[in-house]
Amino acid sequence: MPQRWRDLAGPVGLLPTGPRNAITDVPGVLVGHSQAVSGELTGVTVVAPPQLPARAGVATVNGVGELTKKLEIEEWGIIQTAVYLCGTHALGMVYHGAVLAEGGDPSNTLIPVVGECDDSDLADARTITTEDVDRARAALGTEVPEGSVGGGTGMTCFDFAGGIGTASRRVGEHTLGVLLMCNFGERERLTAGGLRFDPVEPSPPEGSCIAVCACDAPMTAQQLRRLALRPLLGLARAGSYAHNGSGEIAIAFTTAADQTLENSQLNPFFAAAYEAAEEAVYNCLVAERPQLRKRDGREHPQFPRHLLSPSSSGAVS
């Protein structure tokens, strides 16, 4: 079994995790990845709620990026499709593939939820096809590979290989999980494990992060909008300051039918989303992956896992 952050450096935060420490600990939530059939270092990731439509909310810290359906979520507070993640130049094709896959036609108008980050340092995301979307959907399951997989294949996080990371937390009888597509951060600002790194020269392009937060608590759409902000605070804990060119955007949805949670009960869920997002960043960084190369031939550096030890966990707890 691949080693994750907790295996290498100890726990993050105070709350207990679900059994997989993944977004799929939320009952019924599934994740699927596909790699581009073109062979480019890009792909598609899908996060699927168990039932649709589902109540949802969105939040943005810095908006240089795209999450389709954002305006309709703000208006109606629901999503009608799974959440799709991909490289920037694949957004239109993944949107088209999602419409076809989820039954959109002249009698059933759908606006899919598609989030993007720019993977053009490693890949040509224009090569993504609707077949890649179909294969990601066919791979939906409860196990969540992390790192350079699916939509996160060509992403960079704190100038190391980035991509997909996930984590979960238990809040009483409820479960909350976060999945990130990590393509953000300056290496010298990374705080993981108490380590400090020198800046990368020349400075790499500014990046982004899409956060998907799922829970089974009976929240309203307004509460989910507030919840969606908290994973983005977890990015700040890891070292992000939401720089000028970043698209740090989050969506939160619930699998619950009821809307009975009081605002006074929200704080543990806010803390859970904050903690899970921070740990998801670290899980992304330490995920095992092959050595990749950028489009210009340079190596895509990997996080130095060998520098971590459980005794360093105090710096991130």
Image (cartoon, grey):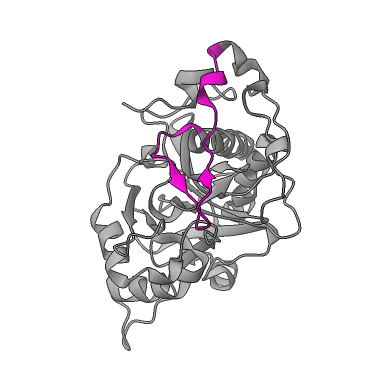
Residue 63 spot, x, y in % from top left: 68, 63
In the rendered structure, the answer to whether residue 143 lies left or right of residue 125 reads: left
- The x and y percentages for residue 136 are 30, 57
Vertically, is 207 above or below 38?
A: above
The stretch of residues the image draws in magenta is 286-310
Magenta segment, prevailing SS (helix, strand or loop): loop
Residue depicted at x 61% and y 55%:
208
Q: Residue at image x 62%, y 65%? A: 65
x and y percentages locating residue 61 in the rendered image:
70, 55
Q: Nearer the viewer, residue 88 or 302?
A: 302
- In the image, 50 versus 241, the foreground residue is 241
Report the quarter where the N terminus lies: top left
On screen, residue 284 above or below 221 = above
The quadrant holding residue 279 is top right
Residue for point 48% across, 22% down? 6
Q: Is residue 102 visible?
A: no
Q: Quadrant of residue 100?
A: bottom left
